[in-house]
Image (cartoon, rainbow, N blue to C red):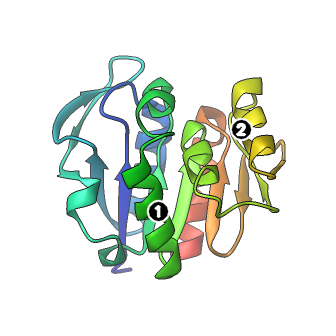
Amino acid sequence: MSKKVLLIIPPERFNEDELFQPKEALENAGVEVTIASTKTGEITGDYQGKTNAEVIFSKVTATDYDALAIIGGSGTNDHLWENQELLSYLKQAHKQNVLVTGICAGAITVAKTGLLTGRKATCYPVDVQKNELKAHNIEYVEQHVVAHNDIITGDGPDGAKEFGKSLVEALS
């Protein structure tokens, strides 16, 4: 499978399970994975796990990828939810038929684009996130993954493996 996915993480405090489990599923399926953020270099996760952001998301063309995934973690709320450049990037990618996905707090980033308005989605089952879905006229569904043909949302670390599997299936 010669597909490419851009995993977008916050510049600090990403969730390790939500990054590493989908990344492993994609790579095992032969998908080329690139990790992006708002800065390059080493980034530390919520539990001190480390990864390397290879590119700044805004410096790469979204249509060079088959899917974009916004990864959660406590840093996602602080750095990605209100990042207007990222929200525009996701909307533009969606218009160009790039699969837009998000897990946990990353699902809220996707919700804030307006692309899920009037649809169903999932997120981490805490009020702050569920209220964000409600505020954007999105029906919260309590399950690990909600997959539409153009957008996939995942609930968090417990559903990270299933989220990765759903990305692989969507790209097949």
Q: Earlier in the sequence, mark 2 or mark 1?
A: 1
Res. 25 visible in picture = no
Q: Residue furthest top?
A: 47
- Residue drawn at x 68%, y 41% is 155
Image x and y of residue 157, in percent:
59, 33
Q: Tell which of 150 and 86 is nearer to you.
A: 86
Horizontal and vertical percent for residue 83? 42, 44
Residue 61 placement, left or right of 23: left
Q: Give the residue type at disc 2.
A: Glu
Task: Pinpoint residue 18: horizontal percent, then vertical percent.
Answer: 50, 39
What residue did someone put label 2 on? Answer: 132
Above or below, 68 against 157 in this view is below
Q: Residues within 10 Å of mark 1 (few under 14, many from 20)?
A: many
Q: Is residue 114 above or below residue 109?
A: below
Read off the residue under disc 1.
Answer: 90
Mark 1: amino acid: Leu
x 61%, y 43%: residue: 108
Asked if residue 145 can be seen in this view, the reply is yes
Residue at coordinates 62% horizontally, 66% vertically from top-left?
Answer: 151
Look at the numbered disc 2 and give the secondary structure of its residue. helix
163, above or below 170, in the image: above
Residue at left 23%, top 65%? Answer: 60
Q: List x then y, in percent, for residue 143.
A: 80, 45
